[in-house]
Image (cartoon, helix red, strand yellow):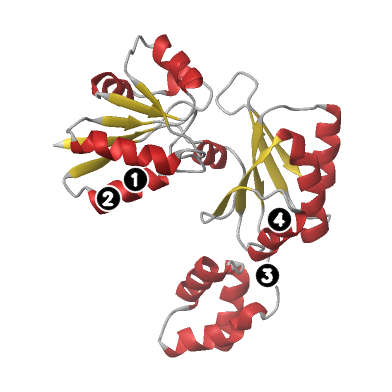
Amino acid sequence: MTNLYVVATPIGNKDDISKRALDTLRNVDIIACEDSRVSKKLLDFYGIQKPLVSYHKFNEKQRSEKLIDELKQGKNIALISDAGMPCISDPGRILVKEVMEKLPDVNVICVPGASSITSFLAIVPRDREEFAFTGFLPRVESQQSKIFSQYKFIDTVFFESAKRLLATLENIKLTRGADCKIAIGRELTKIFEEIKTGTPDEIISYYNDNPLKGEVIGLIYADEKSGDDDGVDDKIKSLQALNYSAKDISQILNALYGVNKNKIYKSAIKKD
């Protein structure tokens, strides 16, 4: 069988690549990469020499057609990005979609590994399991504000460039209030890895004194809903009519709408 491998690469620390990923890169016929200069450094470090084909956001459609032709010829291909998992805020979705639709005899196989999203979420304080991921934020403030408002009641993870971070934090403050809580991560998996949490003003003050470079990942903590937001009382009554317990109702409405579990539980007991 012919295979297209979607392979995760380190997000900062070269040691964070798996043996399976290295074996895959050594055994494929072609490696499709976002920037050959970046990928070559990683491949040279591990003594891997394979033909490289550039595959980035400006040539995805054209290169997908070329790579599909190579797969039709029985060549195995590994798809990598500069860092992390391809297809997640990185090129790859077009190729995967077209292979799945056009080449049913080709296996699309994920070789998992480092991800800035899961690495970040694992080391920031959180009360909730669920989160929304928006990818790179738009540069237009009104478009950003729409996102910040849309995901007001769920923890929201985003990517941003260092040079735009302070302006974005000001926009978060304007849209979500001065008391909202934010976490910012930088240099993940590297020596100077850092997580900062606080209000927009606290984070802005810190980075005014400690300028940063490169890309950062951020989290806007969900606002707590209060009162009968989104008709919670009616939802409680509907679930009670279906014989759900107060505990079950609190878990269901928290998962679906982000309402505080304890508030729901107390309301459900009163209405029982």
* C-alpha separation, residue under disc 2 versus residue under disc 3: 41 Å
Q: Are marks 3 and 4 in contact (CB under 8 Å)?
A: no
In contact (CB < 8 Å): disc 2 and disc 3: no
Residue 236 vs residue 105, the one in the foreground: 105
C-beta proximity under 8 Å, tags 2 and 1: yes
Q: Earlier in the sequence, mark 3 or mark 4?
A: 4
Who comes first in sequence, dot 4 or dot 1? 1
- Amino acid type of the residue tagged 4 in the rendering: Gln
Q: Earlier in the sequence, mark 4 or mark 2?
A: 2
**Horizontal arrangement in the rendering, residue 116 relative to residue 105 (left or right):** right
- What distance separates the C-alpha of mark 3 from that of mark 1? 39 Å
**Residue where numbered disc 1 is placed:** 96
Per the image, the residue denoted by label 3 is 225
Indicate which label's residue lies in the foreground, 3 or 1.
Answer: 1
The answer to whether any part of residue 199 appears in the image is no
- Dot 2: what SS? helix
Q: Dividing the picture into quarters, in which one does residue 234 lie? A: bottom right
Q: Residues within 10 Å of mark 1 (few under 14, many from 20)?
A: some
Q: Which mark is residue 143?
A: none
Say what amino acid the circle numbered 3 marks.
Answer: Lys
